[in-house]
Amino acid sequence: MSGRIADELAIRTLQQAYFHSVDAKDWGLFASLLTEQAMFDFSAAVDPTLAPVRGRQTIVDFVRKSMSAITSAHHGFLRKLEFSGKGAARALWAMEDRLWHGEPGSLTKYMHGHGHYHIGYSLVGSEWKICDWILTRVHVELFD
C-alpha cells in the first residue's frame, strides 16, 4: 500500500502507539514516536503560564516524571487529518483521558478529562513521527 491511504494508516497507528506508550509507561516506545526537535505545549490544558517543552529527551523526561504516580487510560478519535505537503501532516484528535493517582489497587484520586490534541507529524525517512502537539481541554471532572 502506498500514497495517502498508507500515510493515514501509518499516522493512525503512530497515534495509537502514543496513547499505548503513555498508558503502559513504555518510555522507549514513547521516545521512538517523536522527532528529535519535537515540541509539546500543554499550557492551555494545565496552566497558561507554562512554557512548551522542547526536544525529544526533555519531553520524555517531563512526561515520565509527570506520570510517575499516575495510572492512565487515554482514548483518541481522529476528527481531521490534512497533509500539508510531502512528509508533513496535521491532525485534530478528540481525546478523553482518565487519570488516577497512586498504583493499581490503591488509587486515591481521579480525573476525567475531555479535550483535543492538535498534532503535527513529519515523515522521517520512511516513518511518520510526532513533531509538535498542543493539548487543550474543554472539560475536566475531579474526584477524590
Image (spheres, grey):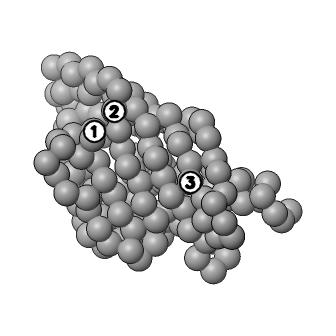
Q: Of label 3 and label 1, which has the lower sequence position? A: 1
Percent coordinates x, y for residue 61 in the rendering: 25, 65
Residue at 30 percent of width and 53 percent of height? 41
Identify residue type, mark 1. Ala
Percent coordinates x, y for residue 119 in the rendering: 48, 52
Instruction: Locate the N terminus and report the quarter of the image it occupies.
Output: bottom right
Q: Of label 3 and label 2, which has the lower sequence position? A: 3
Residue 28 is left or right of residue 64, and the answer is right
Q: Are marks 1 and 2 in contact (CB under 8 Å)?
A: yes
Residue at 17 percent of width and 42 percent of height? 47
In what element is the residue under mark 3?
Answer: strand
Comparing 70 with 135, the one in front is 135
Query: In front: mark 3 or mark 1?
Result: 3
The tag on residue 137 is 2
- Residue highlighted by disc 1: 45
The tag on residue 90 is 3
Spot the residue most to the front.
Answer: 84
Residue at 27 percent of width and 41 percent of height? 44
Q: For residue 104, say whether it is visible.
A: no
Q: Residues within 10 Å of mark 2 (few under 14, many from 20)?
A: some
Q: Residues within 10 Å of mark 1 (few under 14, many from 20)?
A: some
Q: For residue 78, say whether it is visible.
A: yes
Percent coordinates x, y for residue 95 in the rendering: 46, 34
Query: In front: mark 3 or mark 2?
Result: 3
Identify residue type, mark 2. Arg
Comparing 130 with 65, the one in front is 130
> Would you place residue 118 above or below residue 144 in this image?
below
Marks 1 and 2, how far apart in space? 5 Å
Instruction: Locate the C terminus and report the quarter of the image it occupies.
Output: top left
In what element is the residue under mark 2?
Answer: strand
Marks 3 and 1, how far apart in space? 19 Å
Q: Of label 1 and label 2, which has the lower sequence position? A: 1
